[in-house]
Image: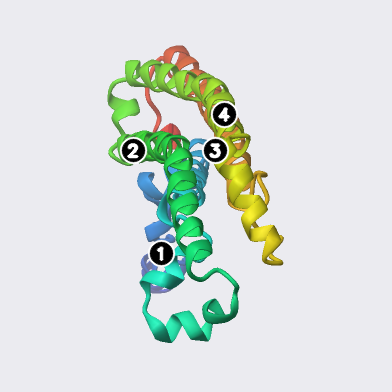
């Protein structure tokens, strides 16, 4: 009997010691939260890409808006920059210099409207991407699935609106480069040995169109993802925690 009682006491002690030997359950990390899961989802990555493309669109459009080009900027920077960058020996002095400044200013006024429109569109699309990203981080689609339909409609309008916007942008740029002001400006600089002032679209304007086209694709994809997320939520009888990134 004593041996049996001792055996039962050893079994009770082993039973109490067994749970302490089991490995502890892994703790949820910072990246396992619903906000981080949303950022790593397809919709979150698409929003981040849209924001980046819109920033690049505004930056490339601001190149045509910010500077008139030519040697006008050198004349306004003072004698140190004027001599350092070769303005004193450029041949654009006296009447030629005044003509170059006048043509630069007139051509810059022709370039500004499409550049302003592109910057405004890029800023509006950036605001839309930030708004949708903030709504996703606050889990608004999870609480109100109808927001996904509104988001899809806005994305579709943005994607479709970029197509005529690109046409308007390059049509106005083409009109500016085909104007007599640009032709006279090109002849003046070419007569002094400068070939970098041709009446053609430059690299920043081409890049703005490329980024706008990529943004249109990104917004189209985002609209499709929003519709898919809405259908997924409607089919669910309950809202499991594993789908919180929607």
Whether residues under marks 1 and 2 lie with C-beta atoms below 8 angstroms apart, the answer is no
Locate residue 211 relative to residue 98 in the image: left or right.
right
> What x and y, as percent, mark residue 236?
44, 17
Q: Nearer the viewer, mark 1 or mark 2?
A: 2
Instruction: Look at 49% across and 35% down and name the residue there.
Output: 43
Q: Which residue is denoted by mark 4 in the rendering? A: 166
Q: Which residue is denoted by mark 2 in the rendering? A: 127
Whether residues under marks 1 and 4 lie with C-beta atoms below 8 angstroms apart, the answer is no
Q: Secondary structure at mark 2?
A: helix
Q: Residues within 10 Å of mark 3 (few under 14, many from 20)?
A: some
Q: Quick check: can you spot residue 50?
A: yes
Q: Which residue is denoted by mark 3 in the rendering? A: 42
Instruction: Look at 36% across and 46% down and name the residue there.
Output: 35
Q: Residues within 10 Å of mark 1 (few under 14, many from 20)?
A: few
Cα gap from disc 3 to disc 2, whole angstroms: 19 Å
Q: Nearer the viewer, mark 2 or mark 4?
A: 4
Cα gap from disc 4 to disc 3, whole angstroms: 27 Å
Q: Secondary structure at mark 1?
A: helix
Cα gap from disc 1 to disc 3, whole angstroms: 41 Å
Instruction: Look at 28% across and 25% down and name the residue there.
Output: 143
> What x and y, as percent, mark residue 5?
37, 68
Residue 73, by quadrant, is bottom left
Q: Which residue is denoted by mark 1 in the rendering? A: 19
Whether residues under marks 2 and 4 lie with C-beta atoms below 8 angstroms apart, the answer is no
> What x and y, as percent, mark residue 157?
46, 18
């Amino acid at each position: 009997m004593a041996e049996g009682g001792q055996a039962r006491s050893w079994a009770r002690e082993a039973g109490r010691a067994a749970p302490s030997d089991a490995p502890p359950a892994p703790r949820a990390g910072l990246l396992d939260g619903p906000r981080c899961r949303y950022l790593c989802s397809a919709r979150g990555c698409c929003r981040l890409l849209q924001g980046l493309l819109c920033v690049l669109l505004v930056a490339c459009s601001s190149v045509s808006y910010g500077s008139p080009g030519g040697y006008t900027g050198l004349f306004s920077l003072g004698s140190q920059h004027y001599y350092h960058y070769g303005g004193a020996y450029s041949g654009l002095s006296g009447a030629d210099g005044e003509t170059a400044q006048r043509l630069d200013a007139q051509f810059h006024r022709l370039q500004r409207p499409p550049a302003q429109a592109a910057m405004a569109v890029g800023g509006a699309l950036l605001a839309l991407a930030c708004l949708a990203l903030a709504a996703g981080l606050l889990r608004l689609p999870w609480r109100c699935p109808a927001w996904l339909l509104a988001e899809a409609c806005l994305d579709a309008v943005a994607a479709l609106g970029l197509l005529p916007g690109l046409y308007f942008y390059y049509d106005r740029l083409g009109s500016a480069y085909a104007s007599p002001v640009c032709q006279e400006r090109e002849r003046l600089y070419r007569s002094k040995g400068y070939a970098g002032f041709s009446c053609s679209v430059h690299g920043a304007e081409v890049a703005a169109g490329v980024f706008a086209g990529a943004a249109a694709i990104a917004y189209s994809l985002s609209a499709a993802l929003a519709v898919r997320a809405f259908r997924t939520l409607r089919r669910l009888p309950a809202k499991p925690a594993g789908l919180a990134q929607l």
